[in-house]
Amino acid sequence: MSNVFFTLTKGPEGLASQPEAATIVKANTYLVFQLDAATALNYMITGYYSNDSKAQLGNGKISEDGSSISILDVNNQPETININVDLQNRTSTEKLTIDPIVVNDPP
């Protein structure tokens, strides 16, 4: 299995994902969404939702400290998926969402 990493950062202009989009070319790839160190001090990941209509994505597993979520992408059908990662401020009720894109291009 392989991993594709997305780094999520909260800056003055809001949330950003690096990369903003990724093409997945291997089957059974883990998509790993990680908060950068500065963002993880103030926010935690609480879950995700997507427009996955072909059952490509598994349940997300959030790390104990809330700084990352790993999602298995079986990648056995072509599909463009918008993934919305949900964040919660650690000290307030503020909630944020960022929506990186995954393009499945099966082997």
Image (spheres, rainbow, N blue to C red):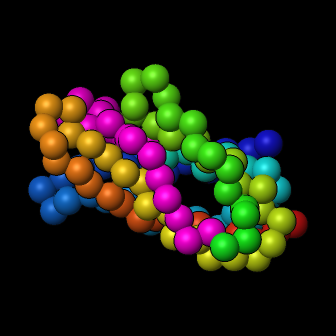
| Up/down of 102 relative to 3, above or below | below
Q: Quadrant of the N terminus?
A: top right
Residue 75: give x, y in percent of width and height: 77, 62
Q: Is residue 39 visible?
A: no
Residue 95: give x, y in percent of width and height: 23, 50
Residue 55: give x, y in percent of width and height: 73, 64
Query: Per the image, is 89 magenta?
Result: no
Query: Per the image, is 49 magenta?
Result: yes
In the visual, does 56 lie left or right of 5?
right
Determine the residue located farthest toward the right in the rendered image: 107
Residue at 62% x, 76% y is 80
- In this rendered view, identify the residue nearer to me: 26 or 99: 99
- In this rendered view, identify the residue nearer to me: 90 or 12: 90
Q: Is residue 26 visible?
A: yes
The magenta segment is 34-52
In the visual, does 45 lie left or right of 42?
right
In the visual, does 90 lie left or right of 69?
left
| Up/down of 106 relative to 91, above or below | below
Residue at 21% x, 40% y is 89
Residue 68: give x, y in percent of width and height: 46, 37
